[in-house]
Image: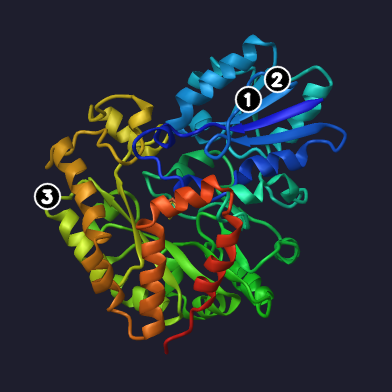
Amino acid sequence: MYVKLILPALTEARSEYFRSIKYSLFPPLGLVTLASYVPDSWNVSITDEHVETLDTSDTPDIVGIEVYITAARRSYEIADAYRKKGCHVVLGGLHVTALPKEAMAHADTIITGPAEEAWPRFLSDFKNGVAAPHYRSATRTLEDLPPLRRELIKRSLYLVPNSLVTSRGCPHRCDFCYSTSFFKGGRSYYSRRVDQVLAEIEGIPGRHLFFLDDNILGDERFALALFEGMRGMNRACQGAATLKSLTNAPLLDAAARAGMRSLFIGFESLNRASLEQTNKHHNDPRGYNQIVRAVHDRGIMINGSFVFGLEHDRHDVFDATVDWAIRSGLETATFHILTPYPGTPLFHRMEKNGRLLHRNWDLYDTRHAVTRHPHMSQAEIEAGYWRAYRHFYSAPNIVRSSASHSSLSHMLRHMLYTIAWKKCDPIWQAIIQARKLPIMHSLLERVLGSARRSQ
Ligand code: SF4
C-alpha cells in the first residue's frame, strides 16, 4: 500500500508575490502528523509543492491533499488528475471544512475538522475496502498522537525544520479566524501532555524550536509546566501568543527562561470599536505599550500582526498603525487586508449584508480587498496595505525602530533580523537554490540566542 501526501502550492507562491524564503520556512507538519498514523508496513511520502516539484506520473493507492483557500484550484487540479488514474483521493484541511460540498466534487473521501481520530479510522476502513465519503473526528484529543515521523521532513529544504505543535485551536473566537469555524461542533482547544512534548523536544536536534500553535500561552497552566520543563534545555524558541496571555508576568518570565526569543502577536487594530466588532474583546489598545515593553524587557522580539479594512477604519489607519509599530520598536510586522474566509462568522455576516465582491478564492490572500468597505474603496485599502509594508520596512524606519530599544545588543539584533528577513531576497534565493539552507540554521540560532533580558 502506498500513501502519498501532498501540500499543493498556494496561488501566490506561483505569482509575482513569490518570495522563496517565505515559502521555505516550515515543513508541512500537518502532513507529517498524518504520515505518522500510516501503518509501518505501508509506504508513505510527503511532497510540498512550495519547495519541490510534484511528480504526478505515479499511481499511489491513497492520495491525501491538504487544501488551503488560495491553493484550492491547484489542489482540485491534482485531485482530479489522480482520480482519473483510479487513485483514492482524500481531501482535508481548512478549506475542505469550510466548503465540504465544493471539495466533495474532487474527492473520493473528505475529512472535515481536525483529523487525528478521523484519519486513522479512514485508513482502517480503506484497508478493509469500506472507505466512506466523509469523515469527521468523533473525539478530539492529542493523547494518542503517535510519535511524529520526523525522518520524513526534508530538513535541507527548510529554514525552520524544528517546528512542533503542542495544542490545537484557540480559546478565543475572533470572527475572522479560521480557528473559530474549523473546530466548531466539538472541543475547540486542547493540548498534548507536557511530558510527551518534552520528550519530543529532547529528540529534536539543534537549539532552535518553532511552536506552530495558534497560541502557545493559551492554557496558562499547561504553558507554565512546559516552560518549567524546558528550563536548562538551552533552546531558542519562537511562537505565537495573544496579548491577553502576555499580561501574565510569571508566565512571560517562564517563557523567557525556557528560551522564548520571539512571539507573533495579533494586535490587529489600534481601534477598540473595530476589535469589539470582530469579537476580539481580549485586545485592549490602551494596554499595548505596556505589553510591548514587558515582552521586549525579557529579550523577546515581536512580530506584530495587523488587519486593515476593519469596520471603523478610515483612510488614516495605515499610517497611524505603522507609526505606532515603529515607535514601539516591533522588530517585524505582518499586515493583512480583512478577508472573510468561508465558514467564519465574518463570511456569513458579509454574505448576508451583500458585501462580498466575488468568490474568486485565489484573491482571498489578505493582499486583496474582497469585500465592500463602508468608508474606503477597494483601491484605497490595497494601496494603503502596500504603503504600510513599504514604510515599515524602509531603511530609515528600520533604524528608527531599532533605536527605540534601550540596549545596544537588542538594537543590533533587531536590525540584523529585520534586514535578513526583508532585504536579502536575492541572497536567500541563491542559498535555497544551492540547497544550503541548513548552514543558516546555526546563524538563526545565534541571532535568537543572543537575546539578554534588558532589565
Ligand atoms: S486569538 Fe488568534 S488564533 Fe485565537 S481566534 Fe483570535 S485570531 Fe484566531
State left or right for residue 258 relative to residue 336.
right
Which quadrant of the rendered structure holds the N terminus?
Answer: top right
Residue 100 visible in the displayed image: no
Q: Residues within 10 Å of mark 3 (few under 14, many from 20)?
A: some
Q: Residues within 10 Å of mark 1 (few under 14, many from 20)?
A: few
State left or right for residue 146 relative to residue 30.
right
Q: Which mark is residue 58?
A: 2
Residue at image point 63% right, 25% down = 55
Residues tagged 2 and 3 counted as in contact (Cβ below 8 A): no
Q: CA distance from mark 1 to mark 3?
A: 47 Å
Q: CA distance from mark 1 to mark 2?
A: 7 Å
At label 1, the amino acid type is Asp
Q: How many marks?
A: 3
Q: Nearer the viewer, mark 1 or mark 3?
A: 1
Q: Nearer the viewer, mark 2 or mark 3?
A: 2
Q: Position of residue 131 (x, y in %)?
A: 74, 20
State left or right for residue 262 relative to residue 270.
right
Dot placed on the residue nearer the N-terminal end, 2 or 3:
2
Q: Which residue is mark 1?
A: 55
Residues tagged 1 and 3 counted as in contact (Cβ below 8 A): no
Q: Which residue is mark 3?
A: 315
At label 2, the amino acid type is Asp
Q: Is mark 1 within 8 Å of ligand 1?
A: no
Vertical placement of 249 versus 188: above or below? below
Q: CA distance from mark 2 to mark 3?
A: 52 Å
Residues tagged 1 and 2 counted as in contact (Cβ below 8 A): yes
Vertical placement of 365 versus 198: above or below? above
State left or right for residue 125 relative to residue 221.
right
Where disc 1 sits, the SS reads loop
Which quadrant of the rendered structure holds the C terminus?
Answer: bottom left
Where disc 3 sits, the SS reads loop
